Image: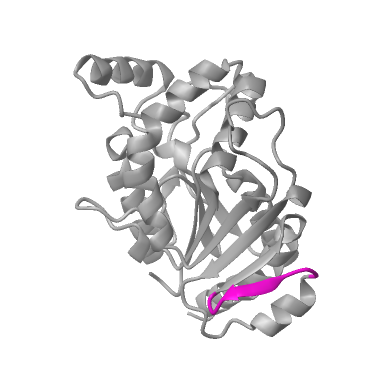
Amino acid sequence: MSKKHPIISVVGSSGAGTSTVKNTFEQIFRREDISAVSIEGDAFHRFNRADMKAELQKHYDEGDPGFSHFSYEANELSELERVFREYSETGKGKTRHYVHDDIEAERHGTPPGHFTQWAEFSDTSDLLFYEGLHGCVVNDEVNLAQLADLKIGVVPVINLEWTQKIHRDRASRGYSTEAVTDVILRRMHSYVNCIVPQFSETDINFQRVPVVDTSNPFVARWIPTPDESLVVIRFKNPRGIDFPYLTSMIHGSWMSRANSIVIPGNKQDLAMQLILTPLIERLVRDGRRA
């Protein structure tokens, strides 16, 4: 952790809505005139698309059907830790992009399924912003959580997460329900052992809970809307959090525990703005003073 070069890490599994959360952070950065360097978890995958397909088959042939992008060994976590550490010490570092589709390929000049070249960060920035799968990993090899100054978890309850993933992969990637189900099953071991433990390391968790029936996500015809959801916001350390102010500002909210507030699903963006803006301002103010 570094006062001069703070790091914000947003962690969520695929389909959790981290992209929406990223947009909220970008709004805060723009409104508060904060210069942020953004890095994506995809940039630290170990394999490109073709190599990952071959690696998946290799693990399957060896009797390991649980290998996936969620797995530690499928990602360059030591490199990610090095980037976190270098930025916290010097404000410098490098990243790259994983190109998902033709639109991104045209933007970056790299074929889909491949990585761009590594590139250095901008010389001047107020903070580093990470969004991805592994930004708070603590294991025998790395400790990313200790290097991040503000750690945010974004996760829906599991059936909602599966519903979101099935609909997204069928709509944007052309997968069948059966193919997405195979991916979900393959990822379960790593989800439990690599992704879930990170939500105990985060400072604040936003968990979306549907209030409609999601008993069978594999046949659900639509994703529950924000109006059909609640969001549970949990603070690891509630000291200094003005809960009466938050519940008065967010209509329909209430405290469910001494460290948790429940809000209507359509108020998540407002809640994030109210909660995160002063925390980010403090990080940046201390960094500029240092």
Front residue of this view, candidates 176 and 277: 176
Q: In percent of the image, x 67 and y 22: which residue is there?
A: 171
Say which residue appears at 42% left-offset and 52% top-offset: 135
Where does the image place residue 47, in percent across and percent down from the top left?
A: 35, 26
Q: Considering only vertical position in the picture, is 150 above or below 285?
A: above
**Place of residue 63 in the rendered image (x, y in percent of width and height, measured from the top left):** 21, 20
Task: Quadrant for residue 29, please give it.
Answer: bottom right
Give percent across and percent down for residue 182.
44, 21
- The answer to whether any part of residue 123 appears in the image is no
Residue 190 horizontal side relative to residue 26, left or right:
left
Compared across the picture, whether 78 is left or right of 134 comes to left
Task: Quarter of the image for the N terminus: give it.
Answer: bottom left
Q: Is residue 236 left or right of residue 186?
A: right
Residue 137, x across and y down, in percent: 34, 53
| Image height of 160 relative to 186, above or below | below
Q: Nearer the viewer, residue 17 or 19?
A: 17
Tell me if 161 is positioned left or right of 247 in this view.
Answer: left
Q: Residue at x 63, y 29 (%)?
A: 168
Q: Nearer the viewer, residue 185 or 103?
A: 185
Segment tinted magenta in the rendering? 251-259
State the residue at coordinates (62%, 52%). Answer: 209
Q: Is residue 125 magenta?
A: no
In the picture shown, does residue 6 fall above or below 139?
Answer: below
The foreground one among 63 and 124 is: 63
